[in-house]
Image: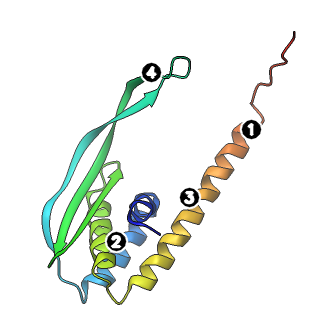
Amino acid sequence: MNREQRLEAMAAADAAAIVALADDVLETFEVEVTRGPTVGLLMVRVEEPADRLPFNFTEVTVAEAEVAAGEHRGYAMVMGKSMEHALAAAVLDAAVAAEHPLCDRIDAFLDEAVRADERRWAQRWAEVARTRVQFEDVT
């Protein structure tokens, strides 16, 4: 999994599980918090479907953090106000960059987090699928 996929997986993963895993990593890995954790707003841009024009749809609350472990940097941004989740995810990002001994465990955890997120989305789509409107094209 590349870094972008890893950061997405950490943002979607259960916050308590991310924090627990980061605590395990921190037993043998020293980091310095270089920014945050802070809470802020992020603009969500979408594309209008008819003319394909971008516009600012809304703002979402996010928490973000950045850490350093020697020459390795870790960063994370998660939706909501969970600064602990963001900081823990940044620690995991730095640990993977530094090839920490728990990298295999981190990767396995993130793979399962992605699969769990996909299952949640599939369930949501299945729940709303029956409300889908089908139009006939009469020519």
**How far is the residue under mark 4 from the one under mark 2?**
40 Å
User: Is 7 above or below relative to 48?
Assistant: below
In this view, which residue lies farthest toward the right? 139
Give the mark toward the camera: 1 or 2. Answer: 1
Q: What residue is shown with label 3?
A: 117
| Residue lying farthest to the top in this orientation | 139
* Label 4 close to label 2 by CB (< 8 Å): no
Alpha carbons under labels 4 and 3: distance apart:
30 Å
Secondary structure found at label 4: loop
Reading the chain from its start, which is encountered first: label 1 or label 4?
4
State if disc 3 and disc 1 touch (CB < 8 Å).
no
If you read the primary sequence from the N terminus, does the residue marked by circle 1 or circle 3 appear first? 3
Gap in angstroms between the C-alphas marked 1 and 4: 28 Å
SS at badge 3: helix
| Disc on the earlier residue, 2 or 3 | 2
Name the residue that disc number 1 marks: 129
Q: Nearer the viewer, mark 2 or mark 3?
A: 3
Find out whether the residues at labels 4 and 3 contact each other: C-beta distance under 8 Å.
Answer: no
Q: CA distance from mark 1 to mark 3?
A: 18 Å
